[in-house]
Image: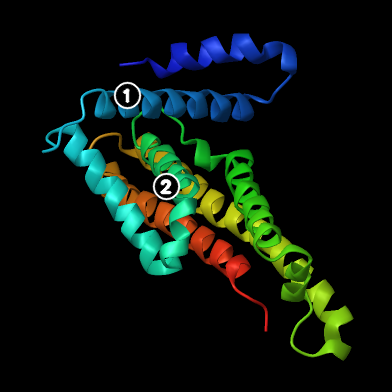
Amino acid sequence: MIHPILFLQFFRELLAPLHISPAGIDAIAYTWLIIALLAILSIMATKALKAVPGGLQNFMEVIISGIENMIVETMGEHGRPFFPLIATLAIFILVSNLIGLVPGFFPPTANINTTAACAVVVFVMTHVVGVKEHGFKYIKHFLGPIMWLAPMMFFIEVIGHFSRVISLTLRLFGNMNGHELVLMIFFGLAPFLVPLPMMMMGVLVSFIQAFVFMLLAMIYIQGSLEHAH
């Protein structure tokens, strides 16, 4: 088991020349830890694939097939090409949320920079897909159904699309940071039995927030694929 204090001390010394805040270093450190853990998990699950899965391969196939089915049900068959992006975001956010329940560890999603980075990825991908799918006609998504209202609708739609980034960022950050603060308070007051209900709630919140982020990402990308009317 990696000792969190030694792990953070290593990254603080490594990133000290960059003058990054301690909270930022914590987020970067645990983000890289999660990336490493997921990479190791992927290698272990795929190094000896079998026609009849068992153990870790079976567990990972259940997760992957569940996310794939959800994408197809939400976006249709044309949503399959976006499976790598959406599945990566969902799994990364879920593990980032859950790691905060380990005493001494910090969830990267409790740092606004991490959640903003994920939100920007969804925002950019949404409009890249829209332009690739519709070309210049993609601008019709911002003009509304009535041409004489198009100038006003354009600014409203632009503000609405940028607000998606803020919404995705603050929803995930607020829930995870709030839960982290409450959990720290309970651990300080009664470090044994009292925090257990909050930790159980934390598991539920972690899954719900990962699901909501994934669902909204699918809805936004699906909207860019549709033809404007």
Residue type, label 2 = Ala
SS label for mark 2 = helix
Residue 77 position, x and y percent, is: 41, 64
Q: Nearer the viewer, residue 167 or 84?
A: 84
Query: In 3D space, how far apart are the residues under numbered discs 2 and 1 (Cα atoms)?
Result: 17 Å
Neighbours of disc 2 within 10 Å: few (<14), some (14-19), many (20+)? some
Residue 131 in view here:
yes
Q: Nearer the viewer, residue 13 or 69?
A: 69
- Please tell me which of labels 2 and 1 falls first in the chain: 1
- Is 139 situated left or right of 47 in this image? right
Q: Nearer the viewer, residue 6 or 85?
A: 85
Residue 173 position, x and y percent, is: 55, 49
SS label for mark 1 = helix
Q: Which residue is mark 2?
A: 87
Quadrant (top left/top right/bottom left/bottom right) for the N terminus:
top left
- Is 193 situated left or right of 101 in this image? left
Residue 50 position, x and y percent, is: 16, 32
Residue at the image position 26 percent from the left and 44 percent from the top: 194
Examine the rendered structure and indicate whether residue 105 appears above or below residue 139. Answer: above
Q: Which residue is mark 1?
A: 43
Residue 88 position, x and y percent, is: 45, 42
Residue type, label 1 = Ile
Neighbours of disc 1 within 10 Å: few (<14), some (14-19), many (20+)? few
- Asked which quadrant contains residue 153, the reply is bottom right
Residue at the image position 57 percent from the left and 27 percent from the top: 28
Residue 104 in view here:
no
Quadrant (top left/top right/bottom left/bottom right) for the C terminus:
bottom right
Q: Are marks 2 and 1 in contact (CB under 8 Å)?
A: no
Examine the rendered structure and indicate whether residue 25 appears above or below residue 50. Answer: above
Residue at the image position 59 percent from the left and 67 percent from the top: 225
- Is 38 situated left or right of 10 in this image? left
